[in-house]
Amino acid sequence: MTPDFLRALLAAERHGIKVAPCMDCGEHCLDRLDPLVLVEGSSPPRCLYHVELAEGRPGTQGHHVGGRPSPLVLPVNVNSHKRLTTIQELAWRLGVEPGTPAAVLVDVLAMNAVLALGTEVEQ
């Protein structure tokens, strides 16, 4: 997602403008309105997971716990993978080196939080 798209979504929210939800997510699925996982320019509006399925891909990606070069790779829903990768990048910008025990700890805590939100769409 481009920073301009994210800024536009945040500005729309501030002004009370509704963001088009993912047309395939259920009414109570948090993914349906999350600007981080909504695919810019998709028509009809869809989240990453549902775009993947529509294009014949499995909707999961391998997540390197602690970042590369971690040998521990877990399959996660692409929407959760986007969130986890964003958290990793923020940690790295704060000085946490990828693949270190500190990076693994940050990632495990992030995975616990992201997966506890219940945003994994039903397959």
Image: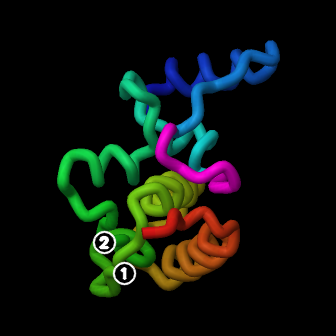
Q: Is residue 112 above or below residue 42?
A: below
Is 46 situated left or right of 62 in this image?
right
The residue segment tinted magenta is: 23-30
Quarter of the image for residue 117 reads bottom right
Is 60 situated left or right of 8 in this image?
left
Q: Position of residue 40 (x, y in %)?
A: 42, 27
- The residue that appears at 30% across and 71% down in the rendered structure is 62
Q: Secondary structure at mark 2?
A: strand
What amino acid does circle 1 point to? Leu
25 or 88, nearer to the observer: 25
What amino acid does circle 2 point to? Gly
- The residue that appears at 29% across and 53% down in the rendered structure is 53
- The residue that appears at 25% across and 64% down in the rendered structure is 58
Q: Is residue 17 above or below residue 72?
A: above
Q: Position of residue 103 (x, y in %)?
A: 51, 74
Q: Which residue is mark 2?
A: 62
Q: Which residue is mark 1?
A: 74
Residue 27 part of the magenta segment = yes
- CA separation in Å, label 1 and label 2: 5 Å
What secondary structure do most residues of the magenta stretch adopt? loop
Q: Are marks 1 and 2 in contact (CB under 8 Å)?
A: yes
Q: Is residue 21 above or below residue 118?
A: above
Residue 6 part of the magenta segment = no
Q: How is the image coloured?
A: rainbow
